Amino acid sequence: MILRPCARLISTSTPSSSRYDAKVFREPITDKNELKKPLSVDDERNFLFIKAMKADETPTFYRNHVVDKLVRICMTDGRKEMSRKNVLSALEIIKRKQYQTWLKAPEEEKSKVELSAFKIVEEGINNCKPLMKLQGVTRGGTTYQVPFPIEDEEAEFRAMKMMRDICRQKSKHGETFFKDALAAELMLAYQNEGATIQAKQELHKTCEANRAYAHYRG
């Protein structure tokens, strides 16, 4: 008998427990502007411990929460460095294209060209976030696909997952490399276009078609 490795599941749920005691630990400050301000006299962080800052929440200019999360979602077989290389290469492609566009643009339109690849990624992923999701609910021996509202964190995860699968499909058939497909899809999503936007719209249409089962949510 041949044993096949199980698919790795990514959990989006909030952990029920933490190693940090809520009585003696407080959340760190991750905003650069807030770090420059002195703490108020009655701020509990003056005399309590501070939790360790997450790697993707550091206020350093070269780290970005959305990009770091995209790296984790695009990872295959635990090869995180390969995934990071692909995502950062996609950002470099976006940066170069936007810079070329800026050079060719008339002086009065240069200010409208977005040169930050981070902002393009953030806005592109934000445009791809679905508002609803379908979830199976069994009633009377029959399973119905019921539309549910979706929280922002899960919506971001689903948007990245849809984009990743589309880019993998393109690179699988030899149309292009993954980094090029990802850069192109992020640019299209930034303009509210592309295959990921279409996938989101198709999901919304399906949710609308199944709205008659919404009363099964409870």
Image: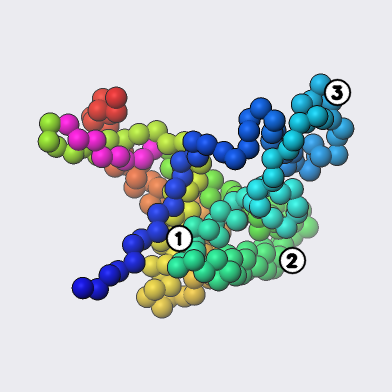
Circle 1 residue: 164
**In the image, is 184 to the left or to the right of 134?**
right
Asked whether 138 falls inside the magenta stretch, the response is yes
Query: Which stretch is magenta?
Result: 132-139
Q: Quadrant of residue 50?
A: top right
In this rendering, which labeled residue sits more in front, label 3 or label 1?
3
Q: Amino acid at mark 2?
A: Leu
**In the image, is 25 to the left or to the right of 191?**
right
At which x and y percent is residue 161?
44, 55
Q: Above or below — where is 9 with respect to 81?
A: above
Asked whether 117 falls inside the magenta stretch, the response is no
At which x and y percent is residue 114?
68, 54
In this rendering, which labeled residue sits more in front, label 1 or label 2?
1
Q: Earlier in the sequence, mark 1 or mark 2?
A: 2
In this rendering, which labeled residue sits more in front, label 3 or label 2?
3
Looking at the rendering, in which quadrant would you find the N terminus?
Answer: bottom left
Q: Secondary structure at mark 2?
A: helix
Q: Amino acid at mark 3?
A: Val
At which x and y percent is residue 217?
29, 28
Q: CA distance from mark 3 to mark 1?
A: 47 Å
> Does the CB distance between marks 3 and 2 fall below 8 Å?
no
Question: At 49% across and 66% down in the image, what residue appears?
Answer: 78
Local packing at callout 1 (Cα closer than 10 Å; few below 14, some 14-19, many 20+) is many
Circle 3 residue: 41
Circle 2 residue: 103
Q: CA distance from mark 1 to mark 2?
A: 31 Å
